[in-house]
Structure formats: structure tokens, C-alpha cells
Image: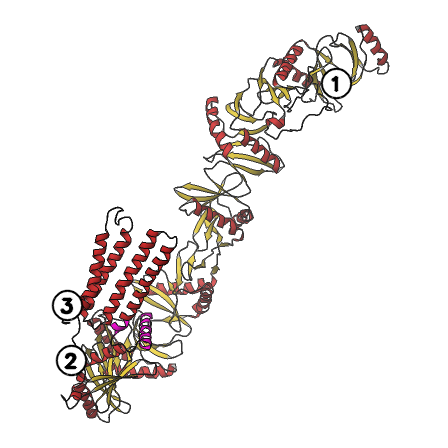
Amino acid sequence: MSSISEIHHKLFRLYEHYVGEPDSSTDVYGYWVFIFGYILGAAGVFVFVVGYAGSADSYTLIRGSGVTAAAGLALCLFGIVLMLPVRRIGIYASVLGLLIALSGVVFFGWAYPYNWRELGVDYSVQVITVYTIGVGLIAGVTALVPVLTGRKGMFVDEEGATDDPAVLTGDAIEGAQFAVFRDEHGDWRWHVLHLEALAASNGSAVTRPDATESIERVQSQISSAGLMELTTSAFRLYEDRDGTWQWTLARDDGSVVGASTGAFADRDGAETSVSFLKDRGPDADVIEIDGAAFTYAERRDLWYWQLVDDNRTPLAGSETGYETQAMAEDAAHQFAERFGRARLLDVEHVGIELVEQLEGWTWRLVDDRDNVVAACSETFDSRRDAEAAVEALLPAFESASVTVAGEPAYELYDSGDQRRWRLVDETERIVARSPRGTTADAAVERSADQFADHALEADVVEIEDAAYEVYPDDATAAGEPEDTLPVTADEPAAKPDGGTTLEYDGEPTPDWHWRLVTDDREVVAASTEPHPDADTATEAIQRVREQASEAELIEFEHAAFQVYEADSGEWRWRLIDEDGNVLADSGDEHTSRGEAAETMMTLKEQAPDAELLEIETAAFELFVDEDGGWGWRLIDEGGQLVAEDPETHPTRGAARQAMNRLLEHLDADVRTMDRAVFQTYADDDWHWRFVLPSGEVVADDAIAHPTRDELVDSLEDIRVAAAGAATHTIGDVTVQLYESGDWHWRLLDRDREEIADSTVSYANRGAGMAAAETLQAHAGDAPIFAIEDAVIRLDGSDDWAWELVDRDREVIASAAETAPSKAAVRSTINTVRQLAPMAGRVDFDVASFELIADDDDRWRWRLIDEDGQTVATGTETHASSEAARAALEDVRSLIEDASILEIDSVSFELHTAADGWVWRLVDEYGSTMAESTQSYESRTEAREAMNNVKSQAPDGWITFTE
């Protein structure tokens, strides 16, 4: 029973239980429509009263409750109309009124409150008019018209006519009665009585009105029914209610033994099907399939094969057609062999397939639906090389960074055993890189951070040969937190070159230094002591210039005595080693040079190897340290160290050359370097390096420019990229998203060379990112496989199915039916593996009978045409295949002798039964409307009983008995 019939049944049962027996179905539906309208209207009033008393939005409250209450009222009135004894035309008028009233309700919901009364365009009159017209039609036509006119006539049934049968009123001396009663299921059935029960209904009715309707249908048609006598088996053709044609095969006793399996568009189609059965049925062979078989069918001039089991359930079929049946047979045998060898490709999320191409081996990524999602950009000499590349790649997926092309980024990566960084701009160009590698992650990150922090405000400078740079301490220049602790009174004051004492008052200020550097950042000379400010450091540079320009060269390899005049005008002496360290000094001052020399000579007896230096002006000293390295230093006439070589050299000559470079660039420009700079320089093309005030180079360019102007113009973009770039740690693999119309992703190695590129696109960045993250999450567990000949792949896009595909993804064969789960389709694959090698051949080039069993192991027959389509099927089931085969032999004889009858109107049928003759009434659709309640000894008795029913039933009265 359908769901609608169940609802219909329940509504009638509830009405009968709580109200009483309905006179018609409109009584029941009218009652429930009235109840629904009442509840709806009451709910609207309740919501309005409760909401209005509260703090609800009055406009929304009035609109909602008004719509609900008005719709409920209209439905209540319509329900009352259905319960009244209203003619059909009255119901139609009330339906029209209901539709108009509900239109008014919708109109109100739209208009209120912004087009109601004072607000907006006032539609209140129109709304009320539409609703009133609708309600007036519902109630007025059926209730007010009879009241006003005093006549029911058109809309309401007239009363006064008796429902009693003529035999009870004396108008007839004989009659029949329809006795309607409930069966064991509570449904209604009926008998036709004429002194005794002559006929019975063939089916049951759910409700009393339905039973009445079926009786009235019999009464209206039985008198015109003709007599159709079955003396032999017959094909009965009939047109169904939906306009299609069907047929059944009946014995001479009227029992149906077979039927068409499909409906036909016209009578000719049904007759053609009957003719096919009469022509082929008597001599058709019986097909028996042992295990499984291949069948072959021709469609559109091409042959296809199909694998079926012993129940003729399709298991597999060819995807393409073949020119001849022989070619289809060869393809079926090849399928059986290839399917047995084929590997089951079960990719959970992503898999990696090794593929052989003309130029070598490569690999590609496939998803769980076997779609290629990415292809490798490289080819390999052998399959093992491709597999090794994949095996090396997979472990790196889990930690792979996901980047986005077009967004500047710092990439931290390994270069050998060193850590380095590079800056990639929005055009995917490397525009800056670290100048050197480091073994510490923190150091390379700090270098990138320093470039990011200072690139925006950095000056652009160019050094012509050499320049003096005056700069503050590292901590302040690099942007690190300054030491805010106050200087205590016990801290000793520092003395820079030139003898200046550093004193701090209040907040500490950075110490300043100077250095002389060449255009390639070689430090020629540097200050030896800190200075309190940039001006003092600049003055120290000027002092170096003055002293160096007049300085003589003094060379010694061991310790030396030195007599010099102090700033006070007194004379002193000291003993210095080859590194310039003071080993001893006079301690006291002397009034003359001779007095100081005499005192010094007394000590020289204790150091006989020490040389004697006499300094009257500033001097350069070349010395060798304890490690054998040579250097230079500049001391003034008072013996104070003014400048020194920042490096040592392997030979005296190299140290002297370094000293000469100071003299060569002695008059170089002085520049205060209180912030980082882009230093431009020419080396064939133009380049830049990024220098912190400390002199540390933290970045080099990655792109050369033909002119300095072009280089300077490019720096603006580099500044912006450096300041806004995110930082990524790059391993062996990086997943990069990029936009090219739609979104794609690709795999890059640590040198930014493409490993693979996606072959699918994504509508937006989020979808591409999700795909990349899925790849990253599951690629580490991806199976690596190669298709040698063919594989079986699973498809779970809807239900589960399988396909046999070759290495080019051409589908060789596929499942004939889908399975509800992955386990079920795996089971089907195992079944095909077992049955395909043993499958024989079944030809459907002629019509054949086949014996099949249903789920209850009941057997029946069916007739198959040349295309393998079922033409007819048995309507009787049997306990065994042998019983079905025996029944089929009986059917063969029935087919041969059967006549063709067309049912186009209600008719009686007389036929024999096991214990005599029976009759039944059949409608124009071949359905039994009524049948005799007993069998008769002779055909004459059966016909007399049939004629009694035919003559008395049209005027029979109806009684109901619980």
C-alpha cells in the first residue's frame, strides 16, 4: 500500500472511531480540513494575544498572526462546505473562493505594514475586498443561496427522494441486494444476493465510500456486459488505464499462466509480441547456464559482450563495440585473462603512478577516483630511477611548506651543510639572498629579519674607491633593545683615540666608531677606541689624516724602547712589544730628552735585544705578532695609538701594502652611517649589497642591472617586498599555489625548480589550498604503482562500481551494476575473478526459454529474444526447476493453440474450474470486477446464475454490516 493510501486509510479510521460512519469521502476530508483550519486560526489568535501583551515587534506580530488566523478561517469554512450535502459544482465554487481568500491572505502578508493605512501606498481596501470575495464565495454559494432563494437546486442536493429499493416499496416483486461487510483485515467487501449470494467482489476497499463506489461501477456496467466464453487457451489483449497495451496468456479455465513483461505504446506492438511468442515459443530451447557465461548482442552494427551468472544477473560488460561477433568473443576471452592478472587499484586519497613514455619514465599523481591531478615535469632513464625519485620525494611531503605565488616570501633553505635565505618577490623572481651561509637556524633567521626591518628606511649609497664610515655600536644600529640601566659612578670612563674621556649624563648614548672601507667592503683602517658621538669620531678621522700624512715608517721585529714627549711637554719612555703592548714605562716625567734616555738606558741593560726608537712625529709601525702575522699601527708623537690594521697579513710586504692603502685613501669622504644602506657597486653590471651600520653585509642582490639608475629604480619594489614578506622554511619539497585564470598548485624543489604541476584547476584560492593540504596530509602514505597491462579501479562517486582500464586509462570493461558499499563491490570483483575464466558461451541469436529462481527459491520461466531482452514471463511459481520445466512444456502447448482476444469493454467470462463451471466479470482493462461465489455442475447452470446477477445487480440496494 502506498503512503497516500495509508494516510487515506488512517483518516477514515479516525473519523469512524470518533465521529461515525461517513456518507462519503468528502465528509471525512471536510472534517479534517475544518479541524486543521480551526487549529490554525486559534494559533493565530493565541500568538497575537500573547505577543501583544509582551514586548514583541508589533508589526511582525500582527502580520504573522493575521495571516495565520485569516487562512484558518477560510479553511474552516471550506471544511464545513465539504461536510454539507453539496453538489459537485458547489464544491468547485467553494474551491475557487478558497483560492481567492488565500490570495487575499498572501496580499495582506505582502502589503502590511509598509503599504497599509498611513504608511506607503494604502492597499488595505483592496486586500479586504479580495479576502471578502473569497470568503463570500465559500459560504455564500452553498449556505446563503439556499437560504435566500428557498431552493437548493444548483448547489445543494434536494431531499425527499427515498433510498429504499423498489422491492421494499412494492414497486417490484424481485430484486438483488449488495451486502457490504468487513473482512478479517477490517476492509470492506461485498456480495450480490438474490435469494442466495451469487457473486463476490474480487478485491477489498479500504473505506465504505470506496466500497460503494466499486458497487456503483459494477451496477453501471454489468447490464451491458457481453459474454466471452473460453473454450481454449487465449491471449487477452487489453489497454491499460495509462493508455498502454499489455497481454496475458490464460488457460481455458481463465487462469493466467504468462504475461508480457513490458507495456506497448499501441495495439500493434502488443500483437507483435504475441505473434513472436506464438512463432518462437513452441520450439524455443531452454537455456541453462552453469556458473557463468558470456553473451553477445548486436547494437547499432556493433557487437558487445556481457558476462552473466547462472541467474542471468549481469556481472560485467564491454565498454566499446566490435565490428564482428568473433572480435567480441576474442575481447571477452582477453577480458577473462586480463581481469585475473589485473591489480586492484584501491587509492584512499592519492596515489603515484609510474608511467613509461617515449622519452623515458615519469610519474603522476592520481586521486581516489583515478583522475590525474598532477604530472611530473621530469623524465627518467628507467623505471627504477623514477621510483627512487618518488621514494625520495614522499617523506618530504609531510613537512612541506605551502606557499602562494605572487606573495613576497623569505625562503629559508639548506645549501650543502649551510643554512641560507632568499627573498622572492610577487613576480616569483629571487631579488635578494643571504651573502653567506651559516650552520645555525637562528643566525639565518636573524639575518633575514634584519633585512626586513631596515630595508624600507635604508639609504642608497655608492663608494668611490673608499670612504670613512662613522657608525654607532651594533646594538643600537641593528634595532636591538638598548641597555637602559644607568651608568654608576664606579664605572671607569673610557678613553678613545685622541684621549677623549667618555662621560654619561642621564640616559646612556651609543658609542661611535669609524672605519675606512673600500668599495668592496675591505676595511683598511678602524678606530681603536669608542667616541661619545659622531662629531668626535669624525674629529678622530681628521686627526688620523693629519698624523698619517706626516708619519714615518718604523719597523721592528721584537720589543723596542721608545722616548717621546708627552702632551705636558715633559719627556717619558716606555718599552713596547712587537704587538704594541706597553711592557714598562718611565712612571715619572723628565725635564729633558737626555734625562729620559739616560733612565731608559739603565733598564735597557735588562733587555739588550730591544731596539731603540726615537719618535719626534707620528709614525707607522710594522710589527709581527706571536702567531707570525704582520700588521701596522699609527701612533702619534706622544706615543698614543691613533689607528691600526684591522687584520693581520702573512708577510711584512703585505702589511706594508695594507698601510699604503690607508695612505692612498687618506682623503676619502667621511659619511655618517647611522642606519643600514644599500651600497651600489659596478662589476661589469651594477649590483647592490645591504650593509648594517656595524659593517655586516646581510643581503646581496640576485639580479644584475645594466645601469645604476635601473638598479636604484628596482630598489623600491625590493624594499616593499622585503618589509611585507612572510617567512617559510623550505625543505626538499614546497607546495606552491598559483593563479592562472583558475587556481593551480605545483611542487618545487629547494632550488625552486618545478618537480610537478597540477593538471586540474580550482575555482578559488580556498579550494586550491584545501587540495594542497589534502595532498600534504596523505601523499606520505600514497601507494606507488605502475600499470603493466591493466588494473581494476574503484569508483565510489555515487554507489560503488569497478572498471578495468589499460595503462592509457581506456576502459576495457566495467561493472554491469553498482554495489551499495566498497566491501560489496570488492566481493563482486572476486566473483568475476572466479567466474570469468570458466564462463562458457550463450547465443541469443534465436529466442530461448530460461528458468530462473527468485529470492524465495521459487522457479518460473521467461522467454528471451535475440537481443537478450525478456519478452514474456510466467505468472505461476514452482518449487523446483524440474516443476518449472514441466509447467513450461504445458505452456508450449497452450501457446500453439491459443486464440487472441481483445478486451475493449466490460464482459463476462465462463470457464471451467477444478470442480465445475465458474464465471467472472472483467473490465476493459482485464481486471476482475466480480466473480461467482461457487462452481456449477454445468455450463448452463453457471450461465443462468450469471444472467441472474446481470439482470438484478443494476437495481440492487446496498446494506452495510459491521
- The residue lying toward the viewer, choosing from 451 and 144, is 144
Report which residue position mark 1 lands on. Answer: 580
* Residue 498 % position (x, y): 68, 14
Secondary structure category for the residue under label 2:
loop
Q: In this view, does 890 lie above or below 30?
A: below
- The residue lying toward the viewer, choosing from 614 and 124, is 124
Point out the tag, 3 or 1, that comes first from the N-terminus: 3
18 inside magenta stretch: yes
Q: Indicate the quadrant containing the N terminus: top left, top right, bottom left or bottom right.
A: bottom left
* Residue 429 % position (x, y): 48, 34
Cβ atoms under marks 2 and 1 closer than 8 Å: no
Q: Is residue 664 left or right of residue 92?
A: right
Secondary structure category for the residue under label 3:
helix
Q: Indicate the quadrant containing the C terminus: top left, top right, bottom left or bottom right.
A: bottom left
State which region is magenta.
Answer: 1-29
Give the CA separation, mark 2 to mark 3: 23 Å
Q: Residues within 10 Å of mark 1 (few under 14, many from 20)?
A: some
Q: How many tags in the picture?
A: 3
Give the CA separation, mark 3 to mark 1: 137 Å
- The kind of residue tagged 1 is Gly
Q: Is residue 722 left or right of residue 613?
A: left
Which quadrant would residue 336 be assigned to in this image? bottom left
**Residue drawn at (36%, 65%) of the image:** 305
Give the CA separation, mark 2 to mark 1: 146 Å
Q: In this view, does 18 lie to the left or right of 709?
A: left
Report which residue position mark 2 lands on. Answer: 161
- The kind of residue tagged 2 is Ala
